[in-house]
Image: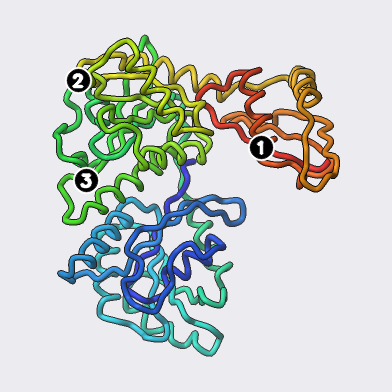
């Protein structure tokens, strides 16, 4: 089942960011009494009762405003509503029903999304009498809560995760490849080149594709499912809205895929947004392939590719295990080689190492480079085993997990890769007390 995307929406200053922070357990969003403080979108992955979901905190939704920032916030909130599987509509219990609440409720009804109506700032039982007027919004039973005090937040999360469990997709045995990257990197051109048809509209305007389209590609008798990350149909008045839409779609595509094909622009080179996308693929535990597109536009000599790849690896650092290939969607140069590499990465992430072999080889590595600790206490790793695949998770049993330092974890991961491969696959190392 794909992970749920939950959007928090509401007019300014009703406590959306406070609720976002309460859900994720940290002060990640800026909380202030001035309306409109949350201008950049925030999204985070969190968990309740074993159910993980991605949470989006949107700015104050002002439906009819012509203010340039409120317009941008409204556009982004509408994107969040459209992409969300569930919307938490937050209203202010102290202020009571506001005309803007009714406007937002109309928008949510037209969107035909699952909605939980949350009446915030209900700090004690006596204030629950304020709920009655919110039934006029026509969005079901209002749920009282206080994000600031944490009152009934657990009950709210129970409702949210119960709704999430009602949703799901039937498992699809086909290999699912997400084509991801920042706007205008050539995602649709790449998919069109693979499919040999103009399936998607391709222009030089960032964010042209609007509808999410999954395309079936028959490759040597095998069906592969291509998930093309969509952008916006038109230019937004505020460029950040395009990037936000792309980020939300990218998250959903990564969660649905088996392997992510991460497109980079050869002319632009690796940029911060590219690295954030690569980081997200690794954080979601997905295999990945980095395809440097528009390679036909680069003036090349015999050293160009190796120099570019070396510079890219320097920037990737801990994510340098992702394989890199140089392609041209326009000339169809090496585009099918990307599929071969993606299939190989998928095989790598499904690999399981026998426990005996794992212990025998890594024991020698641990003896060769014994772990050191700042405290001076001796760290003893007694036993290790692979506990799952996709992504591969390795459990290390030791005398005190708190003594394992990050540099030694990196050493063990490096040795795992040198011994067993796992090209393009993030590894999870878990340390447990024996």
- Mark yes or no: residue 32 visible: yes
| Residue located at (21% from left, 18% from top) | 196
Sequence-wise first label, 3 or 1: 3
Q: Which residue is mark 1?
A: 407
Disc 1 crowd, CA 10 A, few/some/many (<14, 14-19, 20+): few
Horizontally, is 332 left or right of 428 in the view? left
Give the spatial CA distance, label 1 vs label 2. Answer: 43 Å
Asked if disc 3 and disc 1 are in contact, CB closer than 8 Å, the reply is no
From the viewer's perspective, is the residue at label 3 or at label 1 nearer? Answer: 1
Residue 97, label in figure: none
**SS at circle 2:** loop
Q: Quadrant of residue 360?
A: top right
Q: Which residue is mark 3?
A: 232
Q: Which residue is mark 2?
A: 330
| Residue located at (62% from left, 35% from top) | 428
Asked if disc 2 and disc 3 are in contact, CB closer than 8 Å, the reply is no
Instruction: Between residue 300 and residue 230, name the one nearer to us.
Output: 300
Q: How far across and how far down the image is residue 60, in percent?
A: 31, 69
| Residue located at (26% from left, 40% from top) | 183
Q: How far across and how far down the image is residue 3, in percent?
A: 47, 45
Disc 3 crowd, CA 10 A, few/some/many (<14, 14-19, 20+): many
């Amino acid at each position: 089942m794909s992970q749920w995307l939950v959007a928090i929406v509401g007019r300014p200053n009703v406590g959306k960011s406070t609720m976002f922070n309460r859900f994720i357990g940290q002060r990640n969003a800026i909380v202030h009494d001035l309306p409109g403080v949350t201008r950049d979108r925030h999204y985070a992955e969190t968990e309740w009762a074993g159910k993980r979901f991605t949470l989006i905190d949107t700015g104050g939704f002002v439906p009819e405003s012509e203010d340039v920032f409120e317009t941008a916030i409204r556009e982004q909130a509408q994107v969040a509503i459209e992409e969300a599987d569930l919307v938490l509509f937050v209203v202010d219990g102290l202020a009571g029903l506001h005309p803007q609440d009714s406007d937002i409720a109309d928008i949510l009804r037209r969107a035909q999304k699952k909605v939980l109506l949350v009446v915030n700032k209900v700090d004690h039982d006596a204030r629950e009498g304020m709920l009655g007027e919110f039934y006029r919004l026509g969005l079901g039973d209002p749920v009282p809560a206080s994000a600031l005090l944490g009152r009934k937040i657990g009950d709210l999360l129970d409702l949210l995760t119960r709704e999430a469990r009602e949703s799901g997709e039937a498992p699809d045995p086909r290999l699912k490849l997400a084509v991801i990257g920042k706007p205008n990197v050539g995602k649709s051109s790449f998919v069109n080149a693979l499919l040999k048809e103009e399936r998607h509209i391709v222009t030089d305007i960032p964010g042209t594709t609007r509808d999410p389209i999954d395309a079936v590609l028959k490759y040597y008798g095998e069906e592969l499912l291509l998930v093309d990350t969509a952008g916006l149909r038109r230019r937004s008045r505020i460029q950040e809205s395009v990037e936000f839409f792309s980020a939300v779609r990218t998250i959903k595509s990564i969660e649905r895929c088996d392997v992510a094909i991460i497109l980079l622009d050869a002319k632009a080179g690796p940029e911060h947004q590219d690295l954030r996308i690569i980081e997200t693929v690794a954080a979601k535990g997905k295999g990945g392939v980095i395809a440097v597109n528009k390679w036909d536009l680069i003036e090349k000599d015999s050293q160009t590719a190796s120099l570019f790849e070396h510079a890219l690896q320097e920037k990737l650092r801990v994510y340098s295990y992702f394989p890199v290939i140089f392609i041209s969607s326009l000339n169809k140069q090496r585009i099918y080689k990307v599929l071969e590499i993606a299939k190989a990465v998928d095989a790598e992430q499904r690999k399981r190492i026998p426990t005996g072999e794992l212990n025998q080889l890594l024991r020698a590595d641990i003896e060769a480079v014994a772990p050191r600790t700042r405290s001076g206490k001796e760290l003893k790793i007694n036993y290790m085993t692979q506990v799952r695949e996709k992504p591969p998770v390795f459990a290390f049993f030791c005398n005190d997990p708190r003594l394992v330092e990050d540099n030694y974890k990196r050493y063990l991961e490096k040795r795992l890769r040198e011994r067993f491969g796992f090209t393009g696959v993030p590894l999870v190392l878990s340390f447990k007390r024996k």
